[in-house]
């Protein structure tokens, strides 16, 4: 009796060489082009510490009242950061 989940692999819709090539392109890229975090160099006039905290991923945990947009947060950041 079978549950529909066997040890047999599914048939490939492409040949093995194409499958291997696609797998390498998708998963074995040692340099990630997009890390999910913003590049702090692109922030321009933004406060350096603000940019680093925003890029760390902890921004909204540390400063939930800020928006993450420098133009909106500039005045509030200077008030929060100086205190």
Image: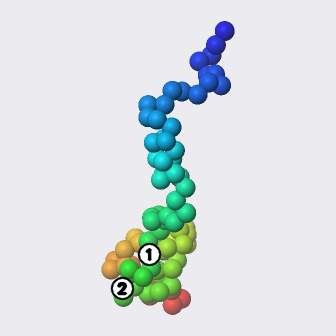
Q: Return the residue nearer the eye: 41 or 81.
A: 41
Taking 58 as reference, is 74 above or below it?
below
Residue at which label 2 appears? 44
What secondary structure is found at the residue carrying circle 2? loop
Q: Residue furthest top?
A: 1
Q: Position of residue 63 (x, y in %)?
A: 51, 73
Q: To which quarter of the image does residue 45 belong?
A: bottom left
Tell me the number on the disc at residue 39. Answer: 1
Tell me the number on the disc at residue 58. Answer: none
C-alpha separation, residue under disc 2 versus residue under disc 1: 11 Å
Q: Position of residue 34 (x, y in %)?
A: 45, 64
Q: Position of residue 7 (x, y in %)?
A: 65, 25
Q: Return the residue nearer the eye: 25 or 41.
A: 25
Label located before the other in sequence (2 or 1): 1
Please give the name of the residue rendered at 37% of the width and 74% of the height, measured from the top-left corner.
Answer: 69
Please give the name of the residue rendered at 59% of the width and 18% of the height, measured from the top-left corner.
Answer: 4
Please give the name of the residue rendered at 46% of the width and 35% of the height, measured from the top-left corner.
Answer: 15
Crowding at mark 1 (Cα within 10 Å: few <14, some 14-19, many 20+): few
- Regarding residue 80, the answer to whether it shows in the image is no
Disc 2 to disc 1: CB gap under 8 Å: no
Crowding at mark 2 (Cα within 10 Å: few <14, some 14-19, many 20+): few
Q: Position of residue 58 (x, y in %)?
A: 55, 69
């Amino acid at each position: 009796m079978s549950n529909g989940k066997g040890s047999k692999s599914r048939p490939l819709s492409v040949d093995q060489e194409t499958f291997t090539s696609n797998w390498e392109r998708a998963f074995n890229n040692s340099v990630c082009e997009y890390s999910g975090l913003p590049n702090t160099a692109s922030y321009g006039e933004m406060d350096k510490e603000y940019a680093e905290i925003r890029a760390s991923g902890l921004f909204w945990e540390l400063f939930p009242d800020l928006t993450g947009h420098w133009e909106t947060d500039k005045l509030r950041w200077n008030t929060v950061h100086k205190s």
